[in-house]
Amino acid sequence: MSSRLFTDVKRFMDYIQKRSYALQFINTIILIAICFYFGYKNHILETKIDNLEKSISKKVDHRYFNMTRSLEDIHNVRIDTLNGSKRP
């Protein structure tokens, strides 16, 4: 009787383990897919931020262009608006 009980318990544990391995495999695949998805979204967001930074720096340079030209003419200096330095 004890060997029959042991066999049934062993068979049940094998069934649970196989089912558990399948669930772990499915969870791993889902986790990998989510990581790739968020990596892709992060890459797109970084690209948009880089483009935004470039356009902002260009707008700032052009916004102060007339004032810079006037100061250059008045004080006889060269002002580098991109790096923020002045040269005599």
Image (tube, grey):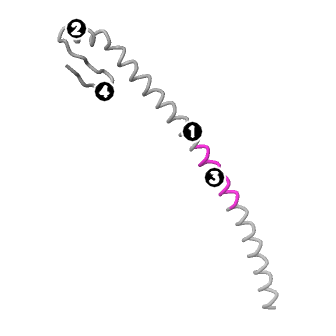
Q: Which residue is mark 4?
A: 83
**Few, some or many residues within 10 Å of mark 1 (<14, 14–19, 20+):** few
Magenta segment main secondary structure: helix
Residues at marks 1 and 4, CA–CA distance in whole angstroms: 32 Å
Which residue reaches farthest left? 75
The residues bearing labels 2 and 4 have C-alpha atoms spaced at a distance of: 19 Å
- What percent of the width, then of the height, locates residue 87? 22, 21
- Measuring from the top left, give residue 2's x and y in whole percent: 78, 91
Horizontal relation, residue 9 to residue 34: left or right: right
In front: mark 4 or mark 3? 4
**Which comes before the other along the chain, label 1 or label 3?**
3
Residue furthest front as drawn: 88
Q: Which residue is mark 3?
A: 32
Amino acid residing under circle 3:
Ile
The residue where tag 1 is placed is 41
Residue 54: give x, y in percent of width and height.
43, 26
Tags 4 and 3 touching, CB below 8 Å: no
Which residue occupies 79% across, 78% down? 11
* Cα distance in 3D space between marks 2 and 1: 48 Å
Mark 2 vs 4: CB contact within 8 A: no
Q: Which residue is mark 2?
A: 73
Tag 1 or tag 2, which sits nearer the N-term?
A: 1
